């Protein structure tokens, strides 16, 4: 392939990576019917559960957004919910998820429940006439994600996976600068020793691959597209992958390595080897509020899609494709697979 052809291919890849191709600055200008009452221009948000991510980031993002407001949170722990909602006047703590879905002031649901509950409560929310922003991973597997997408399409409701890093201007600019990539290395790891943590519970859909490996696969596909071959290995205890590593090969020979772990010190990095240089981005997935808050940008983008009836910026088809690759990595690392096998350690020591 000649230099010009390779350059054209690089430009084509960059165009495909535009993730909707819209600058965040333009988002602020897209507000229909400027004369409408402000309440009509703000999406009423309801939160399923009192998850820590809501306390740390999402509630504040909804409150600060130009097109959203916090209406209610449903939790079995009423005291915790009331404490989390204290900074948001008028927001109500409800004692059941069903009550939240029946609330007429709630137009959109944020679903940060354990992974095993994403499908069930997203489907229930859609059936109740709500739009849904669902935490990553959107489901336990691609089949569940497809079912959720079909339900949203039938109901005419918006559904999007909450990959907030995809909305950070610095990440978008980084990916846009990539030309002629040869290899991508994506790492997300941190030590997690609390066996009571939901991320360490197999029945709840725990494990490093779904929790942080989903980011690694997402950014790799953002840059290189869909892999044609997948090899993987995993360290598994009590049905939980504590570490999963994967090697992906793409149609033109590009490769990617993804590594997700609950066993190592904090490590989060994106490195891209191109024909001309090596690019790196430290903390690609959580470098928020510097000065942009990707949670707020994500919430506003989703709100715009609801208010203006336009497609979401991160299409549900993208989420289904991501789950398919995660499924392939999990399958390739399973005992008895033709690829590298999972490495077991027996029962976890308490």
Image (cartoon, grey):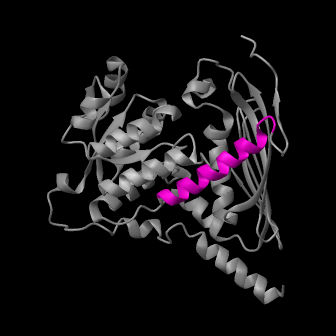
Is the residue 173 above or below the residue 76 in the image? below
Judge by depth and name the residue closer to the eye, 142 or 237. Answer: 142
Give the left or right position of residue 86, taking residue 242 as reference.
Answer: left
Judge by depth and name the residue closer to the eye, 189 or 113. Answer: 113
Q: Quadrant of residue 112?
A: top left
Is residue 324 part of the magenta span, yes or no?
A: yes
Give the left or right position of residue 327, taking residue 158 as reference.
Answer: right
Q: Residue at x 43, y 35 (%)?
A: 54
Can residue 293 be seen in the rendering of this structure? no
Dominant secondary-structure state across the stretch colored magenta: helix
Is the residue 253 above or below the residue 293 in the image? below
Residue 336 lies, in percent from the top left, at 81, 37
Which quarter of the image is occupied by the C terminus?
A: top right
Is residue 285 part of the magenta span, yes or no?
A: no
Q: Residue at x 62, y 39 (%)?
A: 210
Q: Which residues are magenta?
A: 316-336
């Amino acid at each position: 392939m000649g230099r010009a052809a390779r350059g054209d291919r690089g430009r084509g890849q960059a165009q495909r990576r535009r993730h909707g191709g819209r600058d965040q600055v333009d988002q602020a200008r897209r507000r229909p019917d400027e004369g409408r009452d402000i309440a009509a221009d703000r999406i009423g948000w309801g939160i399923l559960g009192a998850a820590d991510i809501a306390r740390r980031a999402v509630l504040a993002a909804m409150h600060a957004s130009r097109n959203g407001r916090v209406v209610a949170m449903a939790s079995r722990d009423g005291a915790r919910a009331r404490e989390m909602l204290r900074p948001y006047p008028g927001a109500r703590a409800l004692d059941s998820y069903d009550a939240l879905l029946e609330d007429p002031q709630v137009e959109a649901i944020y679903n940060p429940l354990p992974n095993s509950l994403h499908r069930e409560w997203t489907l229930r929310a859609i059936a109740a006439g709500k739009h849904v922003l669902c935490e990553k991973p959107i489901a336990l597997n691609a089949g569940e994600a497809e079912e959720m997408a079909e339900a949203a399409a039938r109901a005419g409701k918006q559904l999007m996976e909450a990959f907030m890093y995809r909305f950070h201007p610095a990440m978008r600019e980084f990916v846009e600068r990539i030309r002629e990539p040869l290899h991508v290395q994506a790492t997300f790891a941190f030590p997690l020793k609390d066996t009571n943590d939901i991320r360490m519970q197999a029945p709840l859909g725990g494990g490093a691959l779904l929790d942080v490996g989903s980011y690694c696969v997402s950014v790799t596909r953002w840059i290189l597209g869909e892999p044609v071959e997948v090899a993987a290995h995993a360290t598994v205890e009590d049905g939980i992958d504590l570490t999963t590593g994967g090697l992906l090969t793409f149609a033109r020979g590009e490769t990617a390595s993804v590594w997700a772990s609950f066993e190592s010190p904090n490590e989060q990095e994106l490195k891209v080897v191109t024909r001309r240089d090596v690019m790196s981005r430290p903390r690609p997935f959580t470098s928020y509020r510097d000065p942009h808050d990707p949670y707020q940008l994500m919430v506003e983008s989703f709100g715009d899609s609801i208010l203006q009836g336009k497609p979401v910026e991160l299409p549900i088809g993208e989420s289904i494709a991501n789950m398919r690759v995660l499924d392939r990595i999990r399958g390739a690392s399973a005992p008895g697979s033709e690829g590298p096998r999972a490495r077991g350690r027996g029962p976890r020591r308490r």
